């Protein structure tokens, strides 16, 4: 008798909770949280307890699978809403990525009933796909009697797993990527965006999180094919899900300024050629040409090998810069061309190097391994390492310059796969090294060069002054980035270096090594002790200060604007300031036509500016952007400006 009573009790409890049905690889049952017969709204829940390692799918299953479908039978006066989807999990099945729920899930459904409706039996037939190493379509017919059913606490847990907070986002198209921007207070360990619709993004592609500054972040998604008009879904941050409402994708910038691989390679090559004419590079190239004349006189058969050594130095440097940029970007950093000059230590070190080279050129100091290749070994054509080092130095001093065509090519390169990015940087290096390489491998071109003579020593000394001028400019940049105390430290290091050169010129080899070590340690410790806490702005003018979102604000106000993305260490930027932007006719043109002039200063690192440059497919400065009412998209202006060009806008 006791056994019979126990069996009857278990049967009653089973009926109260909704009978569980085994579909083959899951136990499925229907639950409710109805508290009383007077409740006009409550939840039903379909619970699926799957076999270990088995899973079913979210509304967008990802690369494979499918969502369930359900047929309801309910008393008159009942409305059962669509499922409230819990935040899904990533279920990888290489090379595919799927979205769903593993082992256990409860799907909540909100129910509304008329006040005069009668409680009764609700039935559901659910068809779903359940997978492990294989996928099996299964079905379960389940029911619950609301007149006798007791509320289940499991419903509350299921509702908690459903996102209920909306996350405001922005969406910008950038080549083949979609940049999803959002703000979040707190530490983010991981983030993932589950899109509602298949075909919007590549599910199997990794989603890279990048911090833009403060509490602002950007999740980089790889779009599947065509840029979608809008995206919606769930943004999962750590273990919490947030609703992303349908958000329009801003694709105007990308569509207007994108280039293809062939154009990027061509632009990189042409930009490298033009880079030789930039003022930051000319002194080093001139000195290399000077040494080449001597090589051609003393050892013409070695000329081509010096040319190749120089080219290898150039290409190695460009590849090294590319790898650093690619690696740091993969780690979530926001960087661009010339990024190293945003560090005062590097700017100060380059200033010291330029002063050192200037001292060497003016003096009779014989440093056979100097980077300028003006020592005796180089003059005799015996040191290929010096030619290699000159190629490295040429790239280092070229980094503040951006030649025409370079900006678009490098912006394209930094959003491509690693191999493609490296090819573009190599093409830039080939263009940069080509003039000297051609001189070395085509002997007939040497006839166009001046004959060796006493003028070469005078020319060598004259080249010291462009080096000093470059050093003065770098010191000015350094002053924009640091405090007056740091500036005094840098000037003191120049004094120490000059004294070391003077004191060591008549000493023996051992003493010279000792003096060099002392000077080198002084420079290292001096640069390491920089404070860098006080920063100064570029010279004041009538410009407005750039801030993130300013373009959208001005466009909404129908306000014309001209944005100057610049940096103190960018020689091209400063040249454009002098020959065009600071001219009175240009200022009058801006005032007369009510054009807001905005300056975005990238002298020191600014992730917001870096990301805006990236949105325009640029990796460095200068960048000039113009917009006025009536224009569909902003206009990108050439890297080299003239007064007449601006007045013709």
Image (tube, rainbow, N blue to C red):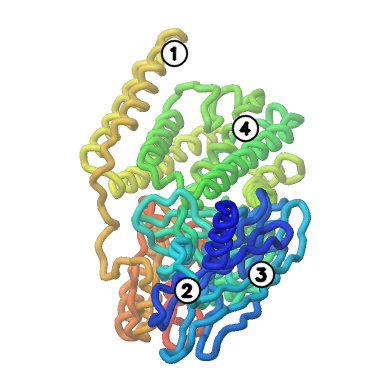
Nearer the observer, 377 or 326 = 326
Mark 2 nearby-residue class (10 Å; few <14, some 14–19, many ≥20): many
Residue 440 location (% of width, % of height): 71, 39
Q: Circle 3 sits on which residue?
A: 67
Label 1 with label 4: CB-CB less than 8 Å: no
Quarter of the rendering occupied by the N terminus: bottom right
Label 3 SS: loop
Q: Circle 4 sits on which residue?
A: 387
Label 1 SS: helix
* Residue beneath the point at 64% across and 25% down: 383
Q: CA distance from mark 2 to mark 1?
A: 83 Å
Nearer the observer, 361 or 584 = 584
Report whether 449 appears left or right of 565: right
Q: CA distance from mark 1 to mark 4?
A: 23 Å
Q: Earlier in the sequence, mark 2 or mark 1?
A: 2
Nearer the observer, 369 or 36 = 36
């Amino acid at each position: 008798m006791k056994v019979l009573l126990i069996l009857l009790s278990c049967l009653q409890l089973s009926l109260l909770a909704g009978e569980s049905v085994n579909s083959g690889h899951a136990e499925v049952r229907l639950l409710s949280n109805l508290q009383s017969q007077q409740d006009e709204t409550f939840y039903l829940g379909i619970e699926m307890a799957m076999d270990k390692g088995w899973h079913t799918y979210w509304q967008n299953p990802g690369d494979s699978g499918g969502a369930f479908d359900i047929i309801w039978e309910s008393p008159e006066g009942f409305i059962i809403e669509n499922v409230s989807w819990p935040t899904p999990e990533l279920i990888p099945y290489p090379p595919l990525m799927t979205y769903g729920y593993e082992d256990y899930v409860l799907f909540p459904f909100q129910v509304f009933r008329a006040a005069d409706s009668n409680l009764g039996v609700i039935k559901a037939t659910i068809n779903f796909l359940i997978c492990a190493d294989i996928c099996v379509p299964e079905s379960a017919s389940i029911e619950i009697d609301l007149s006798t059913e007791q509320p289940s606490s499991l419903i509350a847990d299921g509702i908690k797993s459903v996102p209920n907070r909306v996350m405001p986002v922005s969406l910008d198209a950038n080549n083949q990527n979609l940049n999803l921007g959002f703000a979040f207070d707190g530490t983010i360990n991981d983030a993932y965006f589950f899109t509602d619709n298949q075909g919007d993004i590549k599910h199997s592609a990794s989603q890279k999180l990048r911090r833009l500054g403060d509490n602002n972040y950007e999740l980089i998604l790889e779009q599947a094919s065509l840029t979608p008009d809008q995206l919606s879904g769930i943004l999962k941050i750590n273990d919490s899900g947030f609703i992303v409402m349908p958000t329009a994708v801003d694709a105007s910038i990308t569509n207007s300024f994108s280039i293809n691989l062939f154009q990027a390679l061509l632009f990189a090559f042409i930009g490298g050629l033009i880079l030789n004419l930039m003022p930051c590079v000319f002194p080093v190239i001139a000195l290399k040409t000077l040494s080449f004349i001597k090589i051609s006189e003393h050892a013409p058969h070695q000329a081509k090998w010096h040319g190749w050594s120089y080219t290898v130095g150039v290409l190695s440097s460009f590849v090294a810069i590319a790898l650093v940029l690619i690696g740091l970007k993969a780690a979530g950093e926001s960087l661009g061309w010339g990024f190293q000059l945003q560090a005062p230590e590097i700017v100060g070190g380059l200033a010291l190097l330029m002063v050192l080279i200037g001292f060497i050129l003016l003096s009779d100091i014989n440093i056979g391994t100097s980077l300028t290749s003006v020592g005796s070994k180089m003059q005799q054509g015996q040191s290929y390492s010096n030619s290699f080092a000159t190629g490295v130095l040429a790239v280092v001093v070229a980094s503040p310059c951006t030649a025409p065509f370079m900006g678009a090519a490098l912006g394209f390169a930094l959003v491509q796969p690693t191999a493609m990015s490296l090819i573009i940087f190599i093409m830039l290096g080939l263009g940069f090294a080509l003039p000297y390489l051609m001189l070395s491998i085509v002997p007939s071109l040497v006839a166009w060069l001046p004959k060796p003579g006493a003028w070469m020593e005078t020319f060598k000394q004259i080249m010291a002054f462009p080096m000093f001028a470059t050093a003065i400019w770098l010191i000015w940049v350094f002053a924009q980035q640091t405090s007056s105390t740091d500036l005094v430290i840098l000037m003191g290091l120049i004094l120490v270096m000059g004294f070391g050169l003077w004191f060591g010129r008549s000493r023996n080899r051992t003493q010279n090594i000792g003096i060099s070590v002392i000077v080198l340690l002084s420079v290292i410790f001096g640069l390491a002790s920089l404070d860098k806490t006080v920063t100064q702005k570029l010279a004041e003018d009538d410009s407005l200060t750039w801030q993130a979102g300013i373009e959208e604000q001005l466009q909404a106000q129908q306000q014309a604007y001209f944005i100057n993305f610049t940096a103190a260490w960018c020689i091209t930027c400063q040249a454009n300031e002098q020959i065009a932007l600071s001219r009175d006719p240009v200022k009058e043109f801006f005032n007369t036509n009510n054009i807001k002039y905005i300056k975005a200063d990238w002298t020191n690192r600014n992730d917001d500016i870096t990301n805006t440059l990236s949105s325009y497919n640029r990796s460095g400065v200068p960048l000039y952007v113009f917009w006025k009412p009536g224009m569909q998209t902003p206009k990108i202006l050439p890297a080299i400006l003239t007064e007449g060009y601006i007045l013709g806008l």
